[in-house]
Image: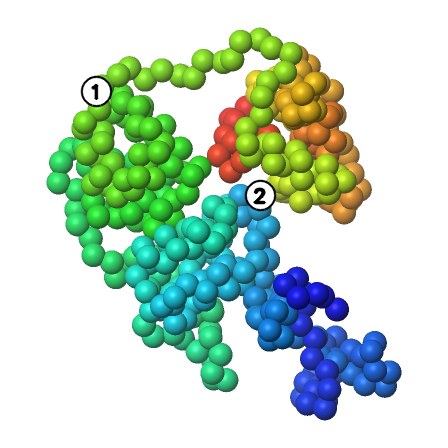
Amino acid sequence: VQPAGVAGELYIAGAGVARGYLNRPELTKERFLDDPFFPGERMYQTGDLARWLPDGTVEWLGRTDGQVKIRGYRIEPGEVEAALRQIDGVRESAVVARTEGEETKLYAYIEGHDQQTVRTELTKRLPAYMMPSSFIEMRDWPVTPSGKLDRKALPAPAEAAECRAYTAPRTITEMKLAQLWEEVLKNGPAGIRDHFFEQGGHSLKATALVSRISKEFGVQVPLKEIFAKPTLEEIAAVIQELDESQYAAIEPAGKQDTYPVSSAQKRMYVLQQLEDGGVGYNMPAALKLTGPLDRARLDEVFRQLIRRHDSLRTSFETGADGEPVQRIHDDVPFQLMELASAEDFVRPFRLQEAPLFRAALVKEAEDRHLLLVDMHHIISDGVSVGTLIHEFSEVS
């Protein structure tokens, strides 16, 4: 039994509990359980996430089986829905996770308020990583025959995008920017009134857009400008106002024993110590390999990646002042493991020991293998993982 304010799974007991599911004995056995508080009675496992409020009422937070992982963070869409319902003027809301290619995004469906107002209010209640990629305004909600919301029938973001007003780019700058915008967001034709963050953008994609703008136009647009002036028209105006400058790569920092960490890395470092070696920040993936396998070459490809990228040779420790620091090693041990199965592959990393990256092979047949890779989120994100996958494919 959870105290007030703490989320937990909702169980229902008492005289109103049904006998079970009609003609579905297996599901009945799974969901209708013995009541530990009243011997001989039964309780129903709803599969809903809820919490007690101070006034004694129960607040529904979503489904327990709806948790998703987005850019390394575990998110319960029901919590986002609960935050939306707290915004004055929002009459109905739903949050759905959709996977497009290798990326999972949250989409918020709302009724009763314009999306910009809702987005602004929601940023006051949720951290950035929980913010939906897009907000879709609804008038008619699809329902099941029993009257419940039919989430599977909610319009896909592309369908909703067709309904928004489109104003084509007018200048050469807007046309070039629209092409970069479309490459980054992969969300259809970009109009000058389109809002970068409402069309699926986030901080990592904003960084990617800034980099492409710098290479295409030869100007350095500050990242904060993307947040302050997020429409295509506004960003194009910023580009035109800036003086052209030659694109310059980021120079490496001078050789040091240790380096400071970012605020995000500091947070992960501290939480990892509190979790006592949990796997919440692990970023595992599995790839199927078919055909003849050159084990020695595969092993060398990973060693080349580790030699090329400092992050794969980085460890973390507590400095003399008590603050976490990162240390880049000239060389780190690495071995491509061979496992009988994938069950025990994902395990905690020790942040004090580099590399915070591991790989293993599971042999399924002579010409079929499973390649397992895992790395800690403290040294990687969605952009860097994409870079590593690209380089791995090119080298191998």
> Marks 1 and 2, how far apart in space?
37 Å
Q: Could you say which quadrant of the image residue 113 lies in?
A: bottom left
Q: Residue furthest left?
A: 170
Q: Amino acid at mark 2?
A: Gly
Whether residue 83 is situated above or below residue 264 in the rendered picture: below
Q: Amino acid at mark 1?
A: Asp
The label nearer to you, 1 versus 2, is 1
Whether residue 15 is situated above or below residue 82 in the rendered picture: below
Residue 346 visible at all: no
From the top left corner, tell me how far across and down residue 322 is, in percent: 69, 24
Q: Quadrant location of the N terminus?
A: bottom right
Q: Could you say which quadrant of the image residue 257 lies in?
A: top right
Residue at 21% x, 35% y: name it.
236
**In the structure shown, which secondary structural element does the residue marked by tag 2 occupy?**
loop
Are there few (<14), some (14-19), or many (20+) residues within 10 Å of tag 1?
few
From the top left corner, tell me how far across and down residue 36 is, in percent: 83, 76
Instruction: Give the labeled residue for mark 2.
Output: 72
